[in-house]
Image (spheres, coloured by chain):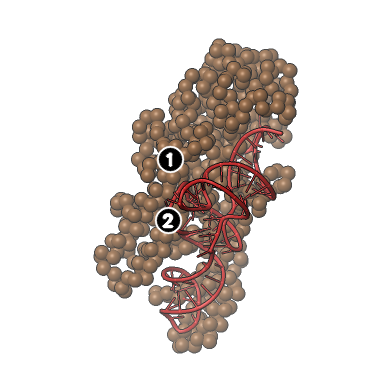
Chain colours: A brown, B red
Amino acid sequence: MPLTIYNTLTKKKEPFETVEPGKVRMYVCGPTVYDSCHIGHARSVVIFDVIARYLRATGYDVTYVRNFTDVDDKIINRANQTGVSSQDVAEKYIREFYEDMDALKVERATLEPRATGHIDDIIRIVSRLIEKGMAYSVDGDVYFAVEKFSDYGKLSGRKLEDMEAGARVDVDERKRNPFDFALWKASKPGEPEWDSPWGKGRPGWHIECSAMSSSLLGETIDIHGGGKDLIFPHHENEIAQSEAAFDKPFVRYWIHNGFINIESEKMSKSLGNFLLIRDVLKNTHPEAIRLFLLASHYRSPIDYNDRVIQDASANLEKLYTLLMRTDSILDSPSRASDRKNGEWWLRFCDAMNDDFNTARGIGIVYEAARAMNRMMDEFPSDPSDADKKTLATNRCDLLKIGSVLGILTESPGQYFETEKQKKLNQSAIDPAVIEKLIQDRAEARKSRNWQQADAIRKQLEAMQVILEDRPDGTIWKMTS
RNA sequence: GGCGGCAUAGCCAAGUGGUAAGGCAGCGGUCUGCAAAACCGUUAUUCUCCGGUUCAAAUCCGGAUGCCGCCUCCA
């Protein structure tokens, strides 16, 4: 099955055909850098990270642009509140964004431009829109005239006449239509500003994306993505600006991800339930967060709560347990060396080709895991080379899928060690005490003193320590 | 008021015309000195409800109920 993508513009799944065969040009709206990133940002960034990885894994040459909007009212407000410059605010949160996304194992985009790096492009487009009569300037501000763009509303499915003028829009006498939006804003004293044909000022919201997208990727691009909330007005306005300026379709496929609720409630500042990525990372493995984010379809709303995070964590552990087991059987755990596309990879691609159905893809991962465990259960104590080869091929598929989802990137040993360490730090139990008890138990077992051995097991259980007796010795894990 | 979405087992979640993936939890079993891990079996005659179309519907159409989102520079 060829790749199909649900296009917000047409409200249908469509076969994916790029402007230039084999090449994908995609642009995803990055953050306005005025505050720390929350779990909702993580969802959007991780989803498009996976989309880019998948397109590359299936042979596309992908140019992925994710911007930073680093000049904006919210940044200026933040700067005024905290008494630092807008640039400092932006720098701080760009730095945080990278810290958070690196921790979540998000790959860097091909290009990560900043709005302030494209002021010339912005001015050029705004001038052009004025020349074409699609925009007008008033007192140093420039507005886009929505009535001049006949397709206005085609993305969000709204009609200007339906949008009850003035209902929830500030009435501004200087605007010809209440939905006209600012392309350029005259600066007030102390605000960031650039010279322009309309006087000193700064870009309005939407225009920076049109500028960066067209200058870095071209006037028609393949994919433009972002959160659902951006459909209106942000993306609607981007279409208006870009298509009015260039007279070409702006974007072929619009992709929008759904939102995250917290305990069934919308995240909002007023409810105080904004979950920052850095806080979630304190207690949850980054790959478990990715697993949680990808376990539902990207357009569905999802709920964040302890239960689903525990599920994701348990599932991740299950997969690393499997990898550890395969590695104990395989002499040299082949990595990308065995590049053959096995059954699991092909089935995974089938799922992903259906509008990036990661939920189904993850289901296939678990099926593969079960099949591999079963295979190993049935192995003789000294498995043949043919057995090992089959296992290695399966393992290779699993890791290849993992490299698209951004999971299973650690060695199992490393994974279990860091998880253990993290839980130990939280529980304040001395590992030396645990090791000592395990030794005592080993001796009790040697002398077949089962009562003593079980007593120690119980004692350790009370300390959140679970024992696992293996042929080559006893290992231990911390619970939750 | 306008636009849109969702409703599948105790929980999470795929499935958009051909007879209900997967995960968690539960129960029974294999393995184990006991466990753990792993595996096997089992758990929705049925997809919010009512009509309709069809040889065939969780899937399409109409209606009802419930929940949610956007229309405020929120991912």
Q: In this view, does A232 lie above or below A151?
A: below
Question: Which chain's residue wears label 2?
Answer: A
Position of residue A369 measured from the top left corner of the image (x, y, whole percent): 41, 61
Marks 2 and 1 in Cβ contact (< 8 Å): no
- Say which element carries label 1: strand
User: In the rendered image, which quarter contains the N terminus of chain A?
Assistant: top left
Residue at horizontal 44 percent and vertical 64 percent from the top: A321
Residue at horizontal 42 percent and vertical 49 percent from the top: A351
- Looking at the image, the residue that sits furthest to the left is A385
User: In the rendered image, which quarter contains the C terminus of chain A?
Assistant: bottom right
Residue at horizontal 58 percent and vertical 24 percent from the top: A152
Amino acid type at image mark 2: Ile
Which residue bears the numbered disc 2? A364
The foreground one among A261 and A164 is A164
Tell me if B34 is positioned left or right of A77 in this view.
Answer: left
Q: In this view, does A151 lie above or below A443?
A: above
The foreground one among A120 and A124 is A124
Which residue bears the numbered disc 1? A4
Question: Which chain's residue wears label 1?
Answer: A
